[in-house]
Image: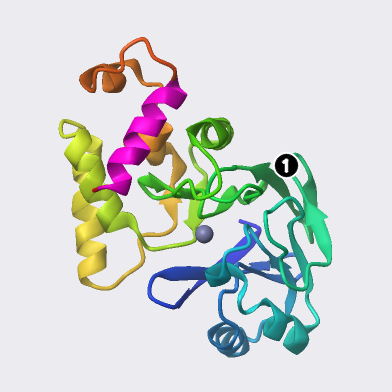
Amino acid sequence: MSLEIEIVPILSDNYVYLARETVSGKVLCVDPGEAAPVLARAEELGWDIDTILITHHHGDHVAGVKTLKAATGATVIGPGGDSQDIPGLDQSVADGDTVSFGSETFKVIGVYGHTSGHITYFAETDQALFSGDALFSVGCGRFFEGTAADMWPGLLKLRELPDASRVYCGHEYTATNVAFAVSIDADNAELHRYAGIVAMLRSEEMPTVPANLGLEKKINPFLRADDPTFAEKHGYQGQEGVTFLAHIRAGKDSF
Ligand SMILES: [Zn+2]
């Protein structure tokens, strides 16, 4: 593993991540929606934040950037193509770009729809995906600035990543996501098994992240919108994945 990753819970259910690249000792922070808890945790760990990675413009992901940048002198990297400016942005990146960080390389993968320019970061050596509000465990982000047609190609790109990949998402939404998934995919045995693990973790107020991408490919309904058997159960046989995805998202929005 080239990254040592720390979860910093903030606000009601957001996760900020601190990641130390073990060869260079460089530290990055993903989506600081608040500065104080992040600075406190970094100080406890003795970590100096060098870089801030941003997935999208929402306040609960960027509100701490200015203070954190002023306190640490970190370089802010984020999507140039989002619908609103990212505060303090030093370097714009887009789908297909790479970001070098010590011995690690992050691949930038655009997953649009939650916001118009939302990006995710995949650490190629460590196989960690910082997915922001694009992909959650057993869920995906609401389509605030796009449609299923915007989101589906991005989800397909994430699905191509290795099964061993660990997913570090922007919120602890897993328990409600699992409840919805069970309601539409009741005979998925792996989903039921995961539901038990999630219930146990949450009863002890433990995070459900990182999620395992290989398991997500089997139980996350939003990654399975082109699964013919699953689609057929809902009357979407022979339809495009994007059409069934829109149906699943609408169901979750009113769940
Ligand atoms: Zn968001």
**Quarter where residue 204 is shown:** bottom left
| Rendered position, 36 above or below 222 | below
- According to the picture, the residue beneath numbered tag 1 turns out to be 95
Q: Can residue 82 be seen in this view?
A: yes
Look at 59% across and 33% down and name the residue there.
157
Write down the region rendered in magenta: 241-254
Q: Is residue 161 visible?
A: no
Q: Which of 26 and 115 is in front in this view?
A: 115
Q: Is residue 251 magenta?
A: yes
Q: Is residue 149 left or right of residue 221?
A: right
| Rendered position, 178 above or below 96 | below
Q: In this view, does 44 lie to the left or right of 72?
A: left
Residue 221 horizontal/vertical position (percent): 34, 35
Secondary structure mostly taken by the magenta-highlighted segment of the chain: helix
Look at 41% across and 21% down and name the residue there.
226
The residue sitting at the right extreme is 90
**The N terminus lies in quadrant:** bottom right
Residue 216 horizontal/vertical position (percent): 39, 40
**Quarter where residue 207 is shown:** bottom left
Q: In this view, does 229 lie to the left or right of 96?
A: left
Q: Which amino acid does label 1 sit on?
A: Asp
Residue 209 horizontal/vertical position (percent): 41, 59
Q: Does the magenta stretch include residue 130?
A: no
**Quarter where residue 85 is shown:** bottom right
